[in-house]
Image (cartoon, rainbow, N blue to C red):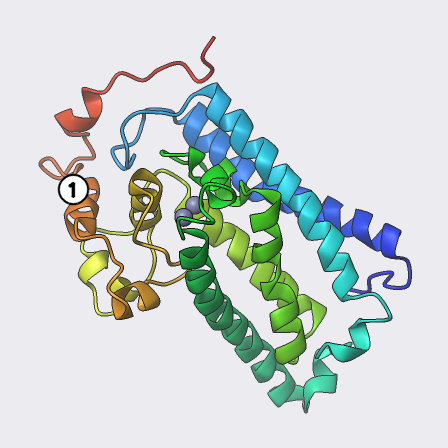
Amino acid sequence: MTLPTDNYALMGIIVLTLLVARYTAISGTLFVWWYALKRGNSSRKIQMKYPTTKDYRREAGYSLLTMLVYATFIALVYIPQVRPYTRMYDSISDMGGPVWGWLYWVLSIVLMLLLHDLYFYWMHRAVHHKKIYPFVHKVHHLSHNPTPLAAFAFHPLEAFTEFLILPIVAFIIPHTTSAIAVWMFFMSLSNAYGHLGFEFYPKGFNNHPIGRWINTSVSHNMHHQFAQQNYGLYTLIWDRLFGTVHSKYDETYNEVTSRYHSEGTNAVTPVSTAISTPPLFHQ
Ligand SMILES: [Zn+2]
Ligand SMILES: [Zn+2]
């Protein structure tokens, strides 16, 4: 994919269009499916109550504002004056031989994810500092019971700090545009899942030798409920290493993933069915 990097305005508009399309396709689709079409029809809802229309609008509004901030700065990273300083290659074959090029392409995406995971953990802990939180990160935490629409619901200043991982990656890791696109797509998917409000990993995943290191929707939902601990993005590596996993994480994960299994059917336990489902849009 070739972007018109010599025309900043055009490139900004193209990036903005792609970002909004990605947000609509991923967060929008998940929201419509789980909060409108299948509303109330799942035992895996993490918090049984549903947010209000006001919450949905606020989450979507701030997320779209974040796309504007992202597009403004993403386009800047690849203008002709800056791009030569990045580690961007035009094609995979430029990064090595035909085989090594593709292997490296995959490795570069893994490196992006690991670097982003580390950056996000410490950036997230920093914005929880009492002197920063009320002015910046509180916007994201207005959602105590998030939906996929909250995936990018940030104060513009936080949107900028979230964006900073792109230049960090672009200046450190040799990459192609396609590798960045795959990383960004995975990031959006992962972010939407973290804010989904439903848990789909299997029972016991939190104690599995691999699963215990992977972030879950329950984990991030608890972060929104209690506004502390469970700071991770893709993984729980840093939370486990630095002792910031919520003490009730396992208990909550087990409770959410144990709700349905009555006599081999998918019948929802009374915990779920007892909850009345409010209308999608409050008047
Ligand atoms: Zn969040
Ligand atoms: Zn937070």
Name the residue carrying label 1: 255
Amino acid carrying mark 1 in the image: Glu
Does residue 75 appear left or right of residue 122 in this picture? right
Assess disc 1: are there few (<14), some (14-19) or many (≥20) residues with their C-alpha within 10 Å of its C-alpha.
some
Q: Quadrant of residue 275?
A: top left
Give 102 or 127, whichever is nearer the viewer: 127
Q: Is 59 situated above or below 70? A: above
Q: Is residue 24 visible?
A: no
The secondary structure type at the circle numbered 1 is helix
x and y percent of residue 114 in the render?
46, 71
Q: Is residue 56 visible?
A: yes
Give 115 or 138, whichever is nearer the viewer: 138
Ligand 1, image quadrant it occupies: top left
Give 180 or 226, whichever is nearer the viewer: 226
Q: Is 3 situated above or below 90? A: above
Does residue 161 appear left or right of residue 270 in this picture? right
x and y percent of residue 199 in the render?
31, 44
Does residue 164 appear left or right of residue 241 in this picture? right
* Farthest-out residue, top: 283
* Farthest-out residue, left: 263
x and y percent of residue 188 in the render?
54, 51
